[in-house]
Image (cartoon, rainbow, N blue to C red):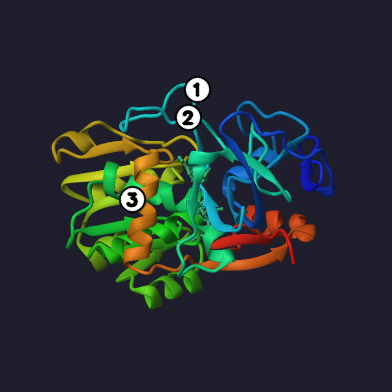
Amino acid sequence: MKALVLKAKDVPLSWEDFPGPTPQAGEVVVEPQTAALNHRDVWITKGLYPGIVFPGILGSDGAGMLAGREVLINPNIGWGPNPRVQKRSYSILGMPKHGTMAEKVSVGEDRVHDKPPHLSWEEAAALPLAGMTAYRALFSRGALEAGEKVLITGIGGGVALFALQFALAAGAEVYVTSSSGGKIARAMEMGASGGAGYTQNGWEKELANQAGGFNLILDSAGGAGFSFFPKLCHYGARIVSYGGSKGAVPNFTPQSIFWKQISILGSTMASDEEFAEMLAFVSLHRIHPVIDSVYPITRAEEAFERLARGEQFGKVVFRVRD
Ligand SMILES: NC(=O)c1ccc[n+]([C@@H]2O[C@H](COP(=O)([O-])OP(=O)(O)OC[C@H]3O[C@@H](n4cnc5c(N)ncnc54)[C@H](OP(=O)(O)O)[C@@H]3O)[C@@H](O)[C@H]2O)c1
């Protein structure tokens, strides 16, 4: 088969011949039509991820054919029985196990779900990893209720845009931040009530003026921006972190959270039950993932660079077959 092969860190990926998968007991071979990029894939190509093995095939997201069935793949491997937290041995499809950026991928047969019929191949590949992450962060960890005010930072991101769509469908009032005024405007066209540019001085005051305060904040950046969140929180608010792209949070004081009874919660991926709930939610509300761009997989390098530069608004998708 052909696959997008990662041979070493910081080396261009190449679409080339690679031995096909040998399914283990309980596994099936899916033939991806489409695969999608996540920031995880970018971190891995730069060597910034634990347990990288070479040569590897990236890709946690894929949709394709299995014995005449149109399916998409749950990228969880071994979440385990506890809905509160994954097992220590948990991993994600696409490193170390070979992923979806190939003509064939072997996955556990219980990883395979019917493709929601209202989704195109591109939309189906865009959904799994980012959709499940947004779903758990918003609902299971963030305990979002209708009518609450939510802040979603970095709205151009794949997870952030699903969080916007899911929160709106659940009846929340949503505000966003972004590096780009154009992305804020697009989020407002989708239903966001307001937003501010996180690169502008005073963005937090601007948000406070617009919204008054938030019941829930979803963030994947951390860094200096995070230290403003408690000030933006209502009493009893939750701050959910699902990533740390900008690193350590300076000037953070316990005083900023205890009087207002603020909860700071970490969130990663989602259990298999939440994955199935997320699919049902997307079908019920007929949500269409926001696709930034679609590339033939032979032009993968351009797609990785687009995500690494943060230019995207939504998911970057590969067509694996024409
Ligand atoms: N814990 C998990 O299970 C999990 C799952 C998925 C992703 N993640 C992590 O979450 C992060 C986002 O992943 P993704 O796949 O959604 O990435 P992505 O599509 O590449 O989006 C990244 C976005 O981060 C935003 N951003 C950059 N600097 C920021 C800042 N200082 N403040 C606020 N936002 C900022 C940008 O938003 P604008 O373009 O609007 O400026 C950018 O579009 C990554 O660190 C990833 O590793 C974690």
Residue at screen point 46% across, 21% down: 88
**Dot 3: what SS?**
helix
Work out which residue is located at the far top of the displayed protein and give it.
Answer: 88
How many residues crowd around disc 2 within 10 Å: few (fewer than 14), some, or many (20 or more)?
Answer: some
Q: Earlier in the sequence, mark 1 or mark 3?
A: 1
Residue at screen point 34% across, 57% down: 280
How many residues crowd around disc 3 within 10 Å: few (fewer than 14), some, or many (20 or more)?
Answer: some
Q: Are marks 2 and 3 in contact (CB under 8 Å)?
A: no
According to the image, label 1 marks what residue? 89
Quadrant in which residue 251 is drawn: top left
Image quadrant in which the C terminus is located: bottom right
Q: Is residue 284 above or below residue 73?
A: below
Q: How many marks?
A: 3
Q: Is residue 277 left or right of residue 214?
A: right
Work out which residue is located at the far bottom of the displayed protein and give it.
Answer: 189
**Dot 1: what SS?**
loop
According to the image, label 2 marks what residue? 78
Q: Earlier in the sequence, mark 1 or mark 2?
A: 2
Task: State the mark number for residue 277.
Answer: 3
Q: CA distance from mark 2 to mark 3?
A: 18 Å
Q: Is residue 174 above or below residue 267?
A: below
